[in-house]
Image: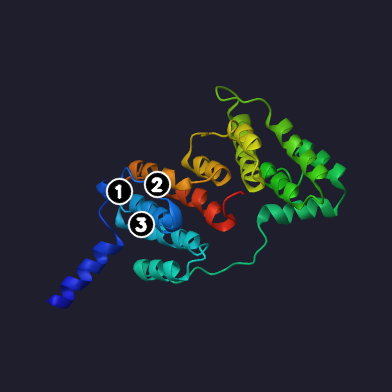
């Protein structure tokens, strides 16, 4: 009987019924930020049905694995009872396509083909161009690619041109990610304005990678927990994952 009670308690620890109300107003600061933020994200996941929590366990552990804290990683793997994520060395699709485009010509050809939307830019043009910006040999070429991306995105639009607005939002996302990686706050804000959801938790976390102290968003992560959709948790993972992977900007 005692053994059964222990098993039940372990299960409740793994998949809690909801975020702790006592923590709703707390931020995560100092040396314990990472542990605190991961706890906030999983607290948001804990309001979801069990099957959705189970599906989130692996992407959650992929973000946990970016931490340098070995004990923390071990604790979460044990808590969620999911094997350590497999480290992949596969080249991302967009990078592969960008390299393919560059193999067939120089940067002038790359940008000409991007503007025309021909192969390989007919599918995933914003992502392929962003990959090209990362492959640029110097800052001058990188800026040419980025400014062409802004040119193709065009002025901000929401009310009309549905297909056009979709690609513009994709350009905004790709440009925001590039700016976050480069620690360029002004560029980041310029790019986020083109996205479909500039107030997204993902972009708030990415912005704090540049400005520092993402832990102030812990209460928002808990407060906006969605009992029906995994999107909130996934955006939190994508946002904070960039901070764990890259660290804060100086």
Type of colouring: rainbow
Question: In the rendered structure, which disc, 3 or 1, sits on the residue that comes first in sequence?
Answer: 1
Instruction: Tell me the crowding category of disc 3: few under 14, some 14 to 19, or many 20 or more residues within 10 angstroms, Cα based.
Output: many
Which residue is the extreme one toward the top? 159
Residue 88 place in picture, x, y as percent: 60, 67
- Where disc 1 sits, the SS reads helix
User: Which residue shows up at 68% across the image and 32% down it?
Assistant: 153
User: Which residue shows up at 62% across the image and 38% down it?
Assistant: 185
Q: In the rendering, which numbered label is found on residue 53?
A: 3
- Where disc 2 sits, the SS reads helix
For the N terminus, the quadrant is bottom left
Residue 191 place in picture, x, y as percent: 63, 35
Taking depth in this image into account, of 82 and 52 the one nearest to the observer is 82
Residue at numbered disc 1: 23
Question: In the rendered structure, which disc, 1 or 2, sits on the residue that comes first in sequence?
Answer: 1
Nearest to viewer (mark 2 / mark 3): 2
Mark 2 and mark 3: span between their CA atoms? 19 Å
Q: Are marks 3 and 1 in contact (CB under 8 Å)?
A: no
């Amino acid at each position: 009987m005692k053994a059964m009670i222990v098993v039940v308690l372990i299960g409740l620890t793994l998949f809690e019924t909801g975020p702790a109300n006592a923590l709703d107003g707390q931020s995560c600061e100092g040396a314990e930020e990472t542990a605190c933020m991961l706890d906030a994200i999983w607290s948001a996941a804990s309001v979801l049905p069990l099957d959705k929590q189970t599906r989130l366990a692996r992407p959650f552990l992929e973000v946990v694995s970016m931490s340098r804290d070995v004990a923390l990683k071990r604790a979460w793997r044990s808590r969620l009872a999911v094997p350590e994520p497999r480290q992949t060395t596969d080249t991302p699709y967009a990078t592969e396509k960008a390299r393919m485009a560059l193999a067939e010509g120089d940067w002038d050809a790359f940008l000409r083909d991007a503007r025309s939307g021909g192969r390989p830019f007919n599918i995933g043009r914003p992502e392929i161009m962003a990959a090209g910006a990362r492959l640029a040999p110097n800052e001058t070429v990188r800026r040419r690619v980025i400014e062409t991306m802004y040119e193709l995105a065009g002025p901000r639009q929401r009310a009309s041109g549905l297909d056009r607005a979709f690609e513009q939002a994709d350009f905004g996302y790709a440009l925001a990610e590039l700016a976050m990686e480069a620690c360029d706050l002004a560029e980041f804000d310029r790019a986020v304005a083109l996205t479909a959801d500039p107030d997204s938790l993902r972009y708030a976390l990415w912005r704090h990678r540049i400005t520092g102290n993402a832990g102030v968003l812990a209460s928002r992560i808990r407060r906006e927990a969605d009992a029906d959709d995994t999107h909130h948790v996934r955006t939190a993972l994508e946002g904070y994952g960039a901070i764990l992977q890259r660290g804060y900007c100086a």
